[in-house]
Image: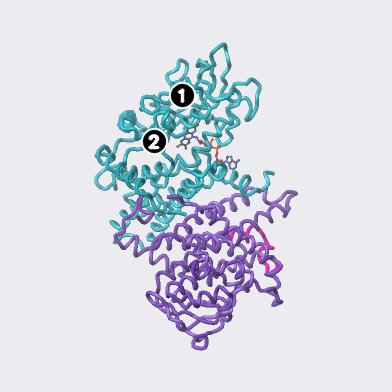
Chain colours: A purple, B cyan
Amino acid sequence: MDFRYTQDQQDLIDAAKAVFDGENTLERMRLIVANEKVDDLWPQFSELGLLGIMAPESVGGLEQDLSVMAGIAEAAGYVALPESLVELAGISVPLLNAMGETGKIKQVLAGDLAVGVLSPLLSNNNQAVHCDLFIRTTRDGGEPVSVPKVKFETRQSIDPLRGLSSATQPGEHNSFVEHHGAVLTAAQLVGLSKRMVDMSVEYAKERHQFGKPIGSFQAIKHHLATVHAQIEFTRPMVQLAALQSGRAVHTAKIAAVDTAMLAAETAIQVHGGMGYTYEVDLHLFMKRAWALCGEWGDRNYHMKQLEDLILDGEAELGPGTSFAA
Amino acid sequence: MEVKFTDAQNAFRAEVREWLAAHVPSERLPSFDTKAGFELHREWERTLAKDKWGNVSWPVEYGGRGLDLTHWLIIEEEYYRADAPLRVSQNGIFLLAPTIMEFGTDAQKARFLPAMASGDEIWAQAWSEPGAGSDMAAIRTKAVREGDEYVISGQKTWSSRAVYADWCFGLFRTEEGSERHKGLSKILVPLDSKGLTIRPIAQLDGDEGFAELFFDEVRVPVDNLLGPEHGGWGVAMATAGFERGLLLRSPARFQAAAARLVDLYKKNRDRVSSGIREQVLQAWMTAERFCAATYALVAQVGAGASISSEASANKIFWSEMDRHLHRTAMTILGARAELESGADAEDNGRWLDGYMFSLAGPIYAGTNEIQRNILAERVLGLPRK
Ligand SMILES: Cc1cc2nc3c(=O)[nH]c(=O)nc-3n(C[C@H](O)[C@H](O)[C@H](O)COP(=O)(O)OP(=O)(O)OC[C@H]3O[C@@H](n4cnc5c(N)ncnc54)[C@H](O)[C@@H]3O)c2cc1C
């Protein structure tokens, strides 16, 4: 029992975070929203090995577990990364690996192949237009579906940084894929929540009313402290869920959804009228949070699973039952 | 990141479980806020002490087992799983002892630690005063040095366990004319001292769980000074840190309560509205989150990190969880919730007791408003003024 990242794991996460923070700046996001051309980050991701975080070492990957990927997903959430790196490296690659498709993994790592996943828990496919191939999930694996065979309907998300499509062939439930999807979505929500708090703190230090920074008012302090505490008690749950299955995963996703919704509502309140505009960057993070709340099992889905397990089942509960033997 | 217990840890858990199965009283003890209940809890402390289960995290040199916090969590899990009696010696063993080990003289360690561990001396805390609650630096009770004695005059209040306990520790103003955080000292005082009047205060449940302490020229030897004279604030903050941090409330307590809540729901499922299902799950999930976060914190402490202001988030989280959990039970019980005893009182009124006590959680050990101030200013960096 040692529930913390090793130094090597932390170094990897920090390195990814440095790239995200350094490259996906607010300026870059504004340009994307304005449909301006920006530099593509995929070559950098490929070069840094980020695409192969979870790929086996035998094909040149870093063979890290889902907890490390969750740390990276949190960092991606923190910048509301437009690229679908988390989906590709954290869901598609592990699925390809489970299917024994090492050749395709090599292509992904080289930056030559973008693979999307069709799952019943994924109602909107992010950046599907950029995919070269899809894997339709089956109960214990997946089957490749070529792009022309997937029927898409373009959808407009409130999140201007997500290019969405819905696919008509959703696939079957697959617990391995859904575990990755739910945990990594929850991790991004933690990052987004933290970012919204950080932006609000900065704003509250700058903005003055009644001759003082608004951050000196206790009402503002307490709102933000409440969200901060929620984040601190959601992150470890998400990390634990990465290494467990079942109820820990449902709990993590629900906690992440509730924390992110609270963070967004609090952040807009702290920003006052500014928060209710398309001009202040806060909305980009808020909208990404709303979007991710519904993916890889929305709150209803995970709550229903928990009801089955906890309220209507005979699971052993209580102290000492949180960690699988 | 490793979230499996080692074979040795699992074996340790089995040993704890076996010991508890053989020793935990078959009937729940009466509250330690009653005279009879207090003495029965003291007896239980002696039982724990005999097999060295009472102070496992103390270093071996002080009579403990020198176990790390992971082992402490395992014990807590088994302890609450077995529904063992609450620890009447909590103030001493978990709060005062670490401070004595850090700041005490060898003579103080030898004098106080063994009697604390054995259950022979039970401790109360005496910080609060009528004029110094959240604002602890407003303490006025004086301890004037006369030769090799302090002469204490003034009043403390809300001192838990003080009605039946043997000793108290707290902060007193030793430097004449000093203000706020300066000039305070941490002093240990026997509760049977001459000039010390203890007036029990009935708590919400009617039991005498805390007391006012009136000091009328109470004399204690200067040897009872813990840490530097006039430097008591720093010493006290060490205690407050431990308290708010980990040791006061482990996740096991809430996980056990959440499991009982699920059972209560199952027993009543036919007569409650379906809306309660989400509340029950919310309580259960929150306890799981507290567990995950505590193991994460323990791993960091194990690797040398120290807990300070971050601990404020802990205090907010467990106290608000506990209140919501118990309120949910009250909702399920409906008209039976008010019953303290009798055939219809669920679990002899335990949910009601628990609900009342949960209302104190956001108040004691630093109110949650104060904790939010600390988080906002010291962790998030918002301006004080
Ligand atoms: C069950 C129980 C056991 C206790 N046991 C002990 C014990 O053993 N020993 C001991 O010394 N004390 C004990 N206490 C006392 C406890 O520490 C105090 O009650 C607590 O610190 C609050 O002080 P107060 O009661 O004077 O409330 P006040 O400080 O008067 O606070 C009243 C309200 O005002 C708010 N408030 C105060 N200042 C601020 C501020 N700056 N910003 C925002 N809001 C503020 C508070 O949060 C609270 O909501 C116990 C209390 C309880 C309920």
* Chain for disc number 1: B
Q: Which residue is mark 1?
A: B109
Q: Residues within 10 Å of mark 1 (few under 14, many from 20)?
A: some
Identify residue type, mark 1. Lys
Residue B135, position as x, y percentages in the image: 59, 35
N-terminal-most mark, 1 or 2 = 2
Which residue lies at the image location 73% right of the left edge and 52% below the top edge? Answer: A209
Is A57 rendered above or below residue B156?
below
Residue B229, position as x, y percentages in the image: 59, 22
Q: Quadrant of residue B202?
A: top left
Q: Residues within 10 Å of mark 2 (few under 14, many from 20)?
A: many
In the image, is the residue at mark 1 within 8 Å of ligand 1 by its beta carbon?
no
Q: Nearer the viewer, residue A90 or B321?
A: A90
Q: Residue furthest top?
A: B147
Q: Nearer the viewer, residue B280 or B318?
A: B318
Which residue lies at the image location 38% right of the left edge and 46% below the top edge? Answer: B252
Q: Nearer the viewer, residue B262 or B20?
A: B20
Q: Which residue is mark 2?
A: B56
Q: Nearer the viewer, residue B135 or B130?
A: B135
Q: Quadrant of residue B209?
A: top left
Asked whether residue B282 appears in the rendered view, the answer is: yes
Q: Which residues are magenta?
A: A263-279
Is B298 rendered above or below residue B201?
below
Identify residue type, mark 2. Val
